[in-house]
Structure formats: structure tokens, C-alpha cells
Amino acid sequence: DAGVIQSPRHEVTEMGQEVTLRCKPISGHNSLFWYRQTMMRGLELLIYFNNNVPIDDSGMPEDRFSAKMPNASFSTLKIQPSEPRDSAVYFCASRPGQGSVRTDTQYFGPGTRLTVL
Amino acid sequence: AQSVAQPEDQVNVAEGNPLTVKCTYSVSGNPYLFWYVQYPNRGLQFLLKYITGDNLVKGSYGFEAEFNKSQTSFHLKKPSALVSDSALYFCAVRNVETGNQFYFGTGTSLTVIP
């Protein structure tokens, strides 16, 4: 099992540019989470999906951020336009969901380090 | 392979007793170590971290963790457990020498019994 896959691993862009982060959850997992980690604020939940449906996006900082999950094996987090304060590490995690022995377990991807200049 | 292991899926402890949640890591170089807590229906919250210095790190809600380099462990501890400590706990390690890669454990479910 390859685990949760995120791409790119590192992204450096200029202010105002569109940034798209990608995530492939573990096959068979029903829930997907997007987190942002900064030194100042720690790890923050941005949005999570159950069965491809967004359940709670209250953590999305503003309208510049959007997330989609068009199918069970792919999700994107888009920032348009990007700003320097968006610089952080963005994590994707997936969770098995109902029917699993450990329904709460989250498996994290390696993260995408975003730098906005 | 670089990884983080939380050997216990579930830990049960009586209220008022000390608790320990175990974490071991396998990362080359000098790691940064973290503990996070997740309460039901919420995202992860930062508890504490070790970067350098004193091996005993104190964090939020009375938690502490001890970095043991020889045993490559970073166990989370609390002298007296509260029912409200019941949650899911994640250990994570960041390898700053190989591109700041983060590795998370799969979590340990802590239940504090009244």
C-alpha cells in the first residue's frame, strides 16, 4: 500500500498565482481531510469530506481557498490568488470510515510545503 | 524506511492515574518530534514538540513527553488523567535533514474511565 500520496512535495510560487495541491487517499477509505500547518498556528483542519461530499469547510480561511473531491481517489485544494501568508505545509489525510476496526484512524500524507513569495 | 510507530491502538486508564501513550520513531538524523490530540469530530490540535534541549518537554493540558534518543522514543505522559483527556493522540516526526518530511503515527485512542 503506497499510503496517502500528495503532490507536489514542494511548491514555490509568486504572490497572485494560482496554486493547486493534490491528494490521493488510500484506496477504500471513506473520509479525506485537508490540514494546514504553520509555526504560529500549528495544525488546522481546513475541510473534510465523507464519501466525496464536503462535510465541514468551516476551517477554510477565506474564499481564495477551495477544495474538491470529484471521486473517491482524488482531491484538490486550490488557492487563487495565493498570498505570502498562505505559506505553510498542507497535509492530506484519509480515514477508513465505518466498518473498520479503527474508524478514527487517520493516515497522513507527507505534506506539501508551499512557499508564496 | 523512515516511520513513526504507535504500538497501542487503545489505552484505557482510570481517572486520576498516570497515563502513558507510546511512540517510537525511525528517522535518520536529528528529528523534530510532535504530539497532537484529536477530540471527536474535530481536527488535530497541537500538544507539544521537541526540537532540542531538555529531553522532558511540557505542553498543553498538563501533558509532557520525554525524548529518549537511545531508545528512539517520545512517549506522552500525564501524572493524573482526566475523563476529558479521552481522545485520539497522534505522534509525528519531522526530518529536517531530508526536506522537512513529516511522518505521522496512526494514532492511539485514549479512554479515561471515571
Image: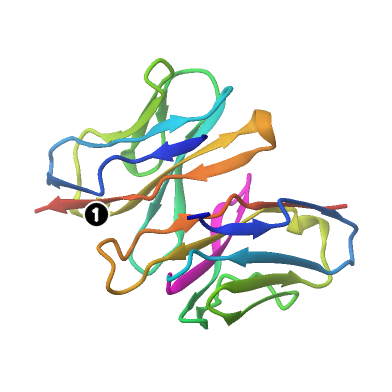
- Residue at the (56%, 54%) spot, across then down: A109
Q: Is residue A65 above or below residue B58?
A: below
Q: Is residue A52 left or right of residue A61?
A: left
- Residue at the (57%, 43%) spot, across then down: B102
The percent coordinates of residue A36 (x first, y second) are 61, 58
Helix, strand, or loop for circle 1? loop
Q: Quadrant of residue B5?
A: top left
Q: Is residue B27 left or right of residue A103?
A: right
Q: Amino acid at mark 1?
A: Ser
**First to last magenta residue range:** A29-45
Residue in front for this viewpoint, A56 or B8: B8
The percent coordinates of residue A50 (x first, y second) are 45, 79
Residue A3 inside the magenta-drawn segment: no
Q: Is residue B105 above or below residue B93?
A: below
In this figure, which residue is indicated by the disc labeled 1?
Answer: B86
Residue lying furthest front: A1
Q: Is residue A18 above or below residue B76?
A: below
Residue in front for this viewpoint, A106 or B78: A106
The percent coordinates of residue A30 (x first, y second) are 43, 74
Q: Is residue A32 left or right of residue B16?
A: right
Q: Residues within 10 Å of mark 1 (few under 14, many from 20)?
A: many
